Image (tube, grey):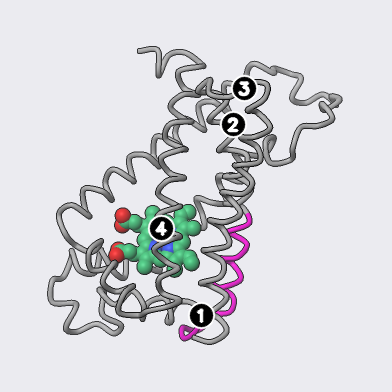
Amino acid sequence: MWLINSSIGRKVVMSVTGLALILFLTFHASMNVVALFSAEGYNMICEFLGANWYAVVATLGLAALMVLHFVFAIILTLQNKKARGTDSYAVTDKPEKVEWASQNMFIIGIIIFLGLLLHLWHFWYNMMWAELSDPTAALTSVPSPSDGYAWIVWTFHDQPGAPLYSLLYLVWFCAIWMHMNHGLWSAIQTLGWSGKIWHNRWQCISFIWSTIVVLMFAVVVIKFAIWG
Ligand code: HEM
């Protein structure tokens, strides 16, 4: 199948899965902002996304997107290295206006992956997994697995090492910003939706979009880290 066998096909898979992940992040950041205004409102959303069959199906879909994005990133990176051959060891003149992020998408991706493991342990494991593996956990564990608001307070304010975790999250968000800022317009270009005029516009849209999403994440961490 051309999506797997050809180089452009693999780039299309990276672009489509990347755009879907950006939509997820946009939704996730908007949902988190609710925690700034209302604990009940945030927990209503968490309950809706908790251990229900449709939320579990969505989680599996999301996991599939992430695995595809990651596996194809490895394949494309190896393929690029092979195509460059021994050049990758030679001192080459880098084209002037190539952004740092564009050359380091894979490394930034690894940092994001490591941050995601920490995040899934903090939230997914303590919430969705706790409910799925033990339906009585809601009665016994503190905070309750359905109390997303309490888990935010615990993670960024109450738990031992909370300031360090908050800092790690902020570093993680910087990596996400770089990856998303480059990935969005780059995906649009791969899919052929960007011409001479729209190239600059998409770069501008990517900058604004990724900045807003990352600021929404960051403001939640900063608020809870300082005030609980
Ligand atoms: C302020 C920052 C963040 C907070 C407070 C937060 C909070 C949460 C919470 C409460 C859940 C559990 C939802 C539930 O099971 O009901 C969750 C799940 C998750 N979060 Fe975050 N999150 C943040 C940032 C991020 C970022 C930046 C990413 C991705 C790069 C991310 C990816 C995920 C994923 C993949 C899940 C599992 C989703 C699922 O079960 O379907 N989160 N997060």
Q: Position of residue 13 (x, y in %)?
A: 43, 27
- The stretch of residues the image draws in magenta is 157-174
Q: Which mark is residue 28?
A: 4
Magenta-span inclusion, residue 219 = no
Q: Mark 1 or mark 2, which has the lower sequence index?
A: 2
Asked if ligand 1 lies within 8 A of label 1, the reply is yes
Residue topped by disc 3: 80
| Rendered location of residue 215, percent (x, y) | 58, 62
Q: Secondary structure at mark 3?
A: helix
Task: Indicate whether 11 appears above or below 24.
Answer: above
Dot 3 crowding, Cα within 10 Å, few <14, some 14–19, many 20+ = few
Compare marks 4 and 3 and give the one earlier in the sequence: 4
Q: For the residues marked 4 and 1, what is the alpha-carbon distance in whole angstroms?
A: 17 Å
Mark before the other along the chain sequence, 3 or 1: 3
Give the left or right position of residue 182, taking residue 28 as reference: right
The residue under label 2 is 186
Amino acid type for the residue under numbered disc 4: His
- The 10 Å Cα crowd at callout 4, few under 14, some 14 to 19, many 20 or more, is some
Tag 1 residue: 224
Name the residue: 35% across, 13% down. Answer: 1
